[in-house]
Structures are given as C-alpha cells and as structure tokens.
Amino acid sequence: MKRIDCLGDICPIPILNLQKELESIHNGNEVTLVTDHSCTLQSVNDFCAMHNLKYTADEVISGVWEIIITN
C-alpha cells in the first residue's frame, strides 16, 4: 500500500499527488492519503467520483485524516 503524506499541503497539492497514483489504484493497489486540510475530503470525494474509485476517511487525531482510496 502506498502512503502519501500531505500534512501541511493545501489543495490542489493532495489531489495532484493522488493523480500520480491513479494507474496504481486502477491496478488494484490501495493508496492512503494523510492530510490535515479538511477541504481535501471534498476534493477526494470529487476525484473518486470522477474516476470511479472508492474511499474511506477516518479522522485519526483531531484535524488529521487518513483517506484510503481503492478501485
């Protein structure tokens, strides 16, 4: 599983980093994106809808989310 650390990054950086892993996700790999920017949740939702992907999000500590993206 690939882990993308986007702590401190604001949009669109997390989505640009996720875009780089799109082929890997479509090949069945999971990607975990870690962010502390709440707007990223909506951006990931939109990205996943556009690319027919699934995701789960968990606020692991206050203000920090782990988002797991799968095919």
Image (cartoon, grey):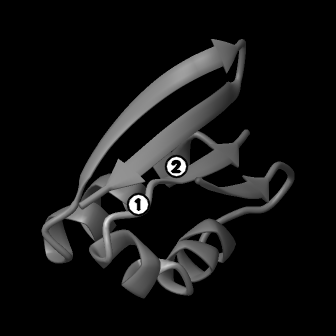
Q: Is residue 41 left or right of residue 35?
A: left
Q: Which amino acid, by three-letter code, is at mark 1?
A: Ser
**Could you tell me which secondary element the residue under label 2 belongs to?**
helix
Is 54 placed above or below 22 here? above
Q: Residue at x 38, y 70 (%)?
A: 25
**Screen quadrant of the C terminus:** bottom left
* Left or right of 32 in this view: 6: right
Classify 55 as above or below 58.
below
Residue 42 can be seen, yes or no? no
* Residue at 82% in and 49% down: 7
Amino acid found under the numbered disc labelled 2: Cys
* Residue located at (72% from left, 62% from top): 10
Gap in angstroms between the C-alphas marked 2 and 1: 7 Å
Residue tagged by mark 1?
43
Q: What numbered label is drawn on residue 39? A: 2
On the image, the x and y values in percent for residue 57 come to 43, 31
As drawn, is 29 to the left or to the right of 15? Answer: left
